[in-house]
Image: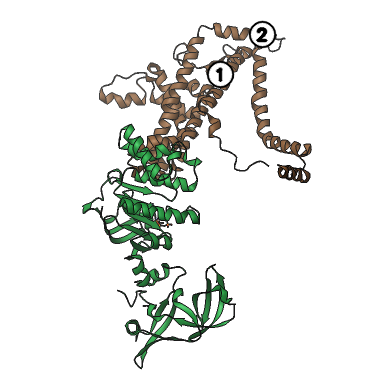
Chain colours: A green, B brown
């Protein structure tokens, strides 16, 4: 089912939950809503589910406006961070509840619940109460309850946040696989950008109720349209510093105190002659070299596979990833080489990208 | 195997299970129980024992200064022979069952559900208003009801209904049970209402959202989610209000005095009060009244145990959060 949000807005008095959201989700697409806490992800999701009434704007399912449609008629399945399994019902009753409400005959209900439970690997737990299950098992039951009525749209509200790191990883791929096999259009809310990047076909980045960007993960990563998106997507986050870009002898130089690099003309020309602009570069695009910009190591954070190194250049700080076997120490002097084909430029006033519009 | 022995021996070496430690643990448990235990002892067990002793005497205001005598179970025999005993017994059950089901639990639940499904502040205000009679002195509250159902040409009901051509009546005397139950239930409902509505508001929103997405209507949510989730307060209010209705009589005393006529609305607790303390021609039959009172206590205890069993309260008690070491 195709889902379309048009100028979707939710306000409570002065509080703005979601502010003119426009986006379109293709049939079978997996879209992630990504953003910091309080940015309106849940609000938008609940409007799609029919729990909240939009203050303004429209929600369309396959071209049909559903603003006034009751949740039970929308045929959506939803999975919550808190699982929201009914504690007084057994696993069977939990999964079967949507079918019971639809007055599905007993025998068919039995079959469908068993099938979904087997698919989720919890077929042997049907007689238990939710309190007698582990977090991972509870999450599977919640997923089963969302799937059992064969919904046309699946909504996930941070479903994995309460699981430990390893389980999160395996559930992540499991959900992704399931969604692809069943081909159900899905919206997945998360504030974990790795989750969004790995699972989603497209990511909607939100901030303060507004849609900041809506693009496939690679595009979001390589062509961030705003400073916020550039800083929010990617781990460790992108480095930013103020520079001035000038053309000299046909080359574009980005300069600040103690820093001077030549940037490719296609990127440089868009930032040149504008006074101070913000240069962004990802940690993996800065490497240690024998020649280049010199700096001093300020902090070393071992991450295991890499060391995350904070290098001071004048009064700017740049984070880079380095091989731990180099045994770099605080106070060491190093030289940095910037992969200038990956630099980003942003307007400091509007915080919009100068490269991608 | 050998290793296990070594380990447990090592443990024993380090921490001998001394009698002293066990004694201290027991002492600690009793220590925590003691304050509540003392209260129950002083204000329940001892009075009940005194009550039982008095119920086996012929103690009354006529022989108070003379030596009174133990008469065994004579008071109980007299009680069961009383011509109005069956009437009083049925009155008591009628009063408790009707007030409890229609008002103290039924109406309380309806009010709680209504006030939690409207705007928050409006609901809060409504509940505050409903609490007012409970904090009004009983005499004032009952006087208002008597005014409402007063005999012609007075009575607010009469005045309200007369434009519709309804014959003025002495409503209180024609429908005494209706008013006895109404008067008690109106106040009684507020207790459950407060408990139920706070329990309903404590239900996490996600459950309701999940049920809506699953396709439940408001009534189905109430039936399948809300009520099961407030099971504990429901059982508690049922139990607590049964016992308190069983022993309450002040509104009936003030409203009808058990009448009109002979024992029409007289309940057990009112009889006990009248026999023991209310002067019939200056004659207080303490011993006889105590027998009525003691049976009431006995019924109360039996009912409490029945409720504990039937509602399986022990299953509702949570496991301790901390293991006792
Ligand atoms: N029922 C409500 N009444 C008033 N304000 C609300 C309500 N629900 C949400 N808000 C406000 O709307 C904004 C967005 O909230 P929302 O729950 O959508 O955030 P979120 O992106 O889901 O955050 P999180 O990651 O913490 O779950 C917040 O500022 C919040 O305080
Ligand atoms: Mg949220």
Crowding at mark 1 (Cα within 10 Å: few <14, some 14-19, many 20+): few
Q: Nearer the viewer, residue A125 or A48?
A: A125
Residue shown at the point (39%, 47%) measured from the top left: A143
Residue under numbered circle 1: B299
Percent x, y of residue A252:
37, 87
| Picture layout, residue A351 above or below residue A41 | below
Is circle 1 on the same chain as circle 2? yes
Q: Nearer the viewer, residue B130 or A145?
A: A145
Percent x, y of residue A350:
35, 75
* Residue A212 visible in the snapshot: no
Residue under numbered circle 2: B72
Percent x, y of residue B137:
50, 31
Image quarter for residue B315? top right
| Picture layout, residue B237 above or below residue A212 | above
Image quarter for residue B145? top left
Q: Chain of mark 2?
A: B
Q: Which mark is residue A147?
A: none
Q: Nearer the viewer, residue A202 or B239?
A: A202
Q: Chain of mark 1?
A: B
Image quarter for residue B158? top left
Label 1 and label 2: CA atoms lie apart by 20 Å
């Amino acid at each position: 089912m195709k889902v379309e949000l048009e100028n979707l807005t939710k306000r409570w008095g002065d509080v703005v939950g979601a502010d003119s959201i426009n986006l379109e989700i293709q049939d079978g697409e997996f879209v992630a809503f990504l953003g910091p806490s309080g940015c309106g992800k849940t609000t938008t999701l609940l409007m799609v589910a029919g729990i909240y009434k939009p203050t303004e704007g429209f929600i369309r399912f396959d071209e049909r406006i559903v603003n006034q449609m009751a949740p039970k008629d929308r045929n959506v399945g939803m999975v919550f961070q808190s699982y929201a399994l009914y504690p007084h019902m057994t696993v069977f009753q939990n999964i079967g509840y949507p079918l019971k409400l639809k007055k599905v005959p007993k025998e068919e209900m039995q079959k469908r619940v068993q099938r979904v439970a087997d698919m989720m690997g919890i077929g042997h737990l049907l007689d238990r109460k939710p309190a007698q299950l582990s977090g991972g098992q509870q999450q599977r039951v919640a997923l089963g309850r969302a799937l059992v009525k064969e919904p046309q749209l699946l909504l996930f509200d941070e479903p994995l946040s309460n699981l430990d790191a390893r389980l999160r990883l395996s559930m992540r791929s499991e959900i992704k696989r399931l969604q692809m096999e069943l081909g159900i259009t899905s919206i997945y809310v998360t504030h974990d950008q790795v989750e969004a990047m790995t699972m989603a076909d497209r990511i909607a980045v939100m901030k303060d109720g507004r849609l900041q960007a809506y693009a496939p993960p690679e595009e979001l990563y390589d062509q961030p349209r705003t400073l916020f998106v550039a800083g929010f997507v990617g781990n460790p986050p992108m480095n930013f510093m103020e520079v001035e870009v000038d053309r000299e002898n046909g080359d574009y130089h980005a300069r600040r105190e103690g820093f001077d690099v030549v940037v490719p003309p296609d990127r440089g020309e868009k930032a040149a002659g504008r006074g101070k602009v913000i240069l962004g570069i990802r940690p993996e695009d800065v490497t240690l070299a024998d020649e280049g910009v010199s700096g001093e190591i300020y902090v070393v954070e071992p991450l295991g596979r890499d060391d995350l190194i904070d290098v001071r250049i004048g009064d700017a700080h740049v984070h880079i990833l380095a091989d731990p076997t180099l045994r770099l120490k605080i106070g060491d002097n190093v030289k940095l080489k910037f992969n200038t084909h990956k630099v980003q430029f942003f307007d400091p006033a509007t915080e919009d990208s100068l490269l991608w519009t | 195997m050998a290793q296990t022995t070594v380990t447990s021996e090592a443990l024993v070496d380090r921490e001998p299970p001394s009698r002293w430690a066990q004694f201290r643990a027991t002492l600690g448990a009793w220590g925590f129980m003691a304050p509540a235990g003392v209260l129950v002892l002083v204000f329940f067990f001892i009075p009940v024992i005194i009550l039982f002793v008095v119920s086996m005497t012929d103690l009354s205001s006529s022989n108070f200064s003379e030596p009174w005598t133990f008469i065994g179970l004579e008071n109980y025999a007299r009680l069961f022979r009383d011509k109005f005993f069956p009437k009083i017994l049925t009155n008591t059950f009628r009063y408790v069952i009707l007030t409890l089901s229609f008002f103290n639990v039924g109406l309380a639940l309806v009010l709680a559900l209504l006030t939690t499904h409207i705007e928050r502040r409006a609901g809060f205000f409504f509940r505050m208003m409903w609490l007012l009679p409970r904090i009004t002195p009983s005499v004032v509250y009952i006087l208002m009801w008597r005014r409402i159902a007063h005999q012609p040409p007075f009575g607010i009901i009469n005045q309200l209904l007369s434009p519709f051509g309804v014959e003025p009546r002495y409503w209180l005397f024609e429908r005494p049970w209706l008013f006895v139950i109404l008067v008690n239930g109106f106040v009684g409902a507020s207790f459950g209402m407060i408990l139920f509505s706070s329990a309903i508001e404590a239900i996490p929103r996600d459950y309701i959202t999940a049920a809506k997405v699953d396709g439940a209507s408001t009534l189905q949510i109430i039936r399948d989610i809300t009520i099961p989730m407030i099971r504990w307060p429901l059982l508690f209010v049922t139990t607590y209000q049964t016992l308190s209705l069983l022993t309450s009589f002040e509104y009936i005393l003030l409203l009808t005095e058990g009448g009109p006529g002979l024992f029409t609305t007289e309940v057990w607790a009112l009889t006990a009060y009248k026999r023991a303390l209310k002067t019939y021609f200056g004659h207080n039959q303490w011993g006889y009244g105590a027998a009525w009172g003691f049976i009431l206590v006995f019924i109360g205890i039996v009912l409490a145990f029945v409720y504990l069993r039937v509602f399986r309260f022990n299953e509702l008690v949570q496991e301790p959060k901390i293991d006792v070491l």
